[in-house]
Each structure stands twice: as structure tokens, then as C-alpha cells.
Image (cartoon, helix red, strand yellow):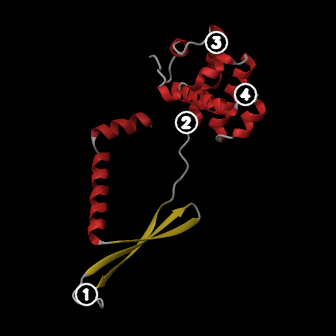
């Protein structure tokens, strides 16, 4: 299976313009970024190249490595995919070696669960109705006030939301539609491929 990069991830061109040692260092930095997150100070100090092109190049290299590992492409397919980008044989071999050395580690990084997000703990609600005011004597203005308590590990937070019943009903309808779509065969197939 041939892996094709989209236009926005074809920033790997700087690799053909630099020394092979810089390519190896770029690969090491890209794998470190996958482990610990992006840190621009690392590539500014380690690589003596203009930082804008290096940042885009490292993002492209990380994308190439992660997508190759996700798809578990073979050595031949990886070489063919990189050769399509117009790199020399030496650079292709360096990238292949980088892929082969780090694919198990990258797959482990990709298999780790995503960082935990705050989740629902409790909900308090109140319905307020304004019956009249000085300018308007016979006015009915209902307002729903929600206090949503979220939990993130040991930390709890509360968010107060205020809306009218029509907007709340629209929100409920949209959430129900999203849940129904999540149960569709198309979404289940996508979720199965992600996991």
C-alpha cells in the first residue's frame, strides 16, 4: 500500500537540502516530539537551520512516521512512498532506517490513551420565570439556569450556563442526533479503525 502525503504535509523538502547528519538528528527530534510534545528550543539549538522551515519539516516528518506506523506499511511501501517525494536514494535509506528503528516505539506512543478530559459529575438546574416588569405587565420570560459540575481527577470545577427553553430544546435535539449518528454503522466502522 502506497502512502501519499497531502499538500499541507509536504514540508519535508528541507531534508534534501541539509547534511545527512542533520536528517538523522531531525528524525531523533521528531521521535522525541512524539514522546514529549513539541519544544521549539530543541531544534533551534540542535539544528542550525532557519527555524520556520525546520518546524514545518519536523511536523511533516512526524506526520510521515505516525501515519506510516498507523497503517503499518511495509519497508518496500515506505521506500516507494518516500521516493515519490523526490528524495535521493541515500536520504530514502536514512528515512527507512529511522522508520524501522522507531516504528515499535511510535506504535506504543499511538496506542496510549489520550489525556483525560473533564467528565460529568453532577448537574443542578433551576427554572426562573419573569412574569412582568415595569414596562411590560404581562410578560412571560422563562430562563433555565444550569450548574454543571465536572471532575478531572481529584479536581472539580463548576460551570454556570443560562439559556431559554427553546435553545435548551435545540441543544438536546442536537445531542440526541449526535448520539444517534454515533450508533450508525459508518461511525462504528470509523471508531473500529481508530482503535
- Asked if marks 1 and 2 touch (Cβ < 8 Å), the reply is no
Look at the picture and state if 156 lies above or below 88: below
Q: Earlier in the sequence, mark 3 or mark 1?
A: 3
Callout in the foreground (4, 3): 4
- Asked if marks 3 and 1 touch (Cβ < 8 Å), the reply is no
Residue at 74% x, 36% y: name it: 42
Indicate which disc residue 110 carries.
2
Q: Position of residue 191 (x, y in %)?
A: 39, 39
Q: Position of residue 33 (x, y in %)?
A: 65, 36
* In the image, farthest residue toward the front: 135
Indicate which disc residue 49 carries.
4
Q: Which residue is mark 1?
A: 136
The CA distance from mark 3 to mark 1 is 79 Å
The 10 Å Cα crowd at callout 3, few under 14, some 14 to 19, many 20 or more, is some
Indicate which disc residue 93 carries.
3
The CA distance from mark 4 to mark 3 is 22 Å
Amino acid at each position: 500500500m502506497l502512502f501519499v502525503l497531502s499538500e499541507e504535509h509536504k514540508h519535508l523538502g528541507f531534508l534534501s537540502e541539509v547534511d545527512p547528519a542533520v536528517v538523522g538528528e531531525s528524525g531523533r527530534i521528531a521521535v522525541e516530539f512524539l514522546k514529549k510534545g513539541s519544544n521549539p528550543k530543541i531544534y533551534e539549538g540542535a539544528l542550525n537551520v532557519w527555524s520556520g522551515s525546520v518546524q514545518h519539516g519536523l511536523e511533516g516528518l512526524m506526520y510521515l512516521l505516525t501515519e506510516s506506523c498507523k497503517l503499518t506499511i511495509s519497508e518496500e511501501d515506505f521506500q516507494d512512498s518516500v521516493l515519490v517525494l523526490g528524495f535521493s536514494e541515500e536520504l530514502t535509506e536514512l528515512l527507512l532506517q529511522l522508520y524501522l528503528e522507531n516504528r515499535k516505539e511510535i506504535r506504543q506512543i499511538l496506542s496510549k490513551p489520550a489525556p483525560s478530559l473533564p467528565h460529568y459529575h453532577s448537574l443542578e438546574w433551576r427554572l426562573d420565570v419573569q412574569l412582568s416588569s415595569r414596562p411590560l405587565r404581562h410578560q412571560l420570560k422563562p430562563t433555565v439556569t444550569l450548574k454543571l459540575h465536572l471532575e478531572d481527577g481529584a479536581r472539580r470545577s463548576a460551570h454556570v450556563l443560562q439559556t431559554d427553553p427553546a435553545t435548551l430544546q435545540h441543544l438536546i435535539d442536537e445531542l440526541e442526533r449526535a448520539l444517534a449518528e454515533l450508533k450508525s454503522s459508518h461511525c462504528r466502522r470509523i471508531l473500529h479503525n481508530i482503535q
